[in-house]
Amino acid sequence: MAENFVLVHGAWHGAFCWAAVINELGKHGDHTYAVDLPGNNGNPLDRAKVTLQIYVNSVAKFIEDRQLRNVVLAGHSMAGLLMPGVVAKIPDRIKRVVFVTAMVAEDGKAGFDPGAKSTEALAALANSRYDKSLPIDAMGDAFRTFFMQDAKKEMQDWVLSTLCPQPIQPFLDPVDMKSFHATKVPQSYLVCEDDLAPDGHPIWHPTYSGRLQNPSIRKIKSGHEVMFTHPKTCADALYEFARE
């Protein structure tokens, strides 16, 4: 039976990042949709007004407007902060939630530690801009070195050229994990074993994955930008998760 996949991008990205993965899933006959989050170039909204709840509402509405059910909801990186809210909002429509080398917050806490010096610096940078967002160039060479070190320079250049500023507020809003866990929707985590993001000291697994409840786990050899560098392997893992 064909699956309904809804794919959510991470920070700085857009729905376009899933194109190759969608192509691979289509070979199985699955129905796959990719969401552009508000404030992204494909979904215009004043970035200064974007919050985590706006993200949640947007993805839930995307699913409801298309009358999708038995959805495998998969999100990359920052999308891990908003998927719990989507599941809690429309649990009857979600079959499984898959965290693709994604952030997982502790209950009632934000994705970024508000007391951390790095967070203070990022917040100050965002607040200095009219759109309260982080430009991709704020990372300097870190994107190439830690996010996409397993790609050729040509691919790195292309991906960097497609990225847009990222609203800071979704990283600072608390995440309600308790309501998410109460739904009992099955959870999965895709571990990218070569993920060095954000700074060479990856915390994706087991730190983030360990905050889920009895997740099924698959591991693949890939860096953080798995949708670009290993789309078939990523799609195969999503396909397998969906059929658990």
Image (cartoon, helix red, strand yellow):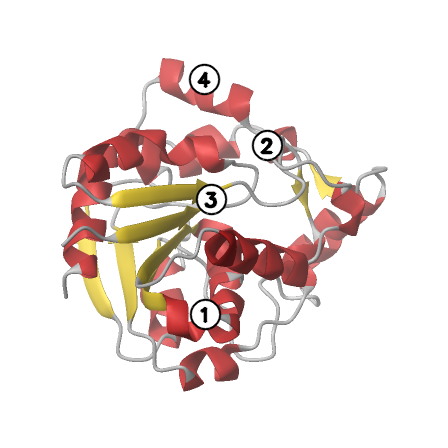
Q: Nearer the viewer, mark 1 or mark 3?
A: 1
Instruction: Name the residue at 71% across, 48% down.
Output: 122
Q: Nearer the viewer, mark 2 or mark 4?
A: 2
Q: Quadrant of the N terminus?
A: bottom left
Of mark 3 and mark 4, the one earlier in the sequence is 3
Q: Nearer the viewer, residue 70 or 72?
A: 70
Mark 4 vs mark 1, CA separation in Å:
33 Å
Return the residue at label 2.
42
Q: Nearer the viewer, mark 2 or mark 3?
A: 2
Tell me, for residue 87, which label it has, or none: 1
Instruction: Name the residue at 74% across, 56% down.
Output: 120
Q: Position of residue 236 (x, y in %)?
A: 16, 45
Q: Contact (CB < 8 A) between labels 2 and 4?
A: no
Vertical arrangement, residue 58 with respect to residue 195, above or below:
below
Q: Contact (CB < 8 A) between labels 1 and 2?
A: no
Q: Position of residue 24 (x, y in %)?
A: 21, 34
Of mark 2 and mark 4, the one earlier in the sequence is 2
Return the residue at label 4.
158
Side (left or right) of 222 relative to 100: left
- Residue type (three-letter) at the residue carrying disc 3: His
- Residue type (three-letter) at the residue carrying disc 4: Trp
Q: Nearer the viewer, mark 4 or mark 1?
A: 1
Vertical arrangement, residue 149 with respect to residue 54, above or below:
above
Mark 2 vs mark 3, CA separation in Å:
12 Å
Return the residue at label 3.
9
Disc 2 crowd, CA 10 A, few/some/many (<14, 14-19, 20+): few
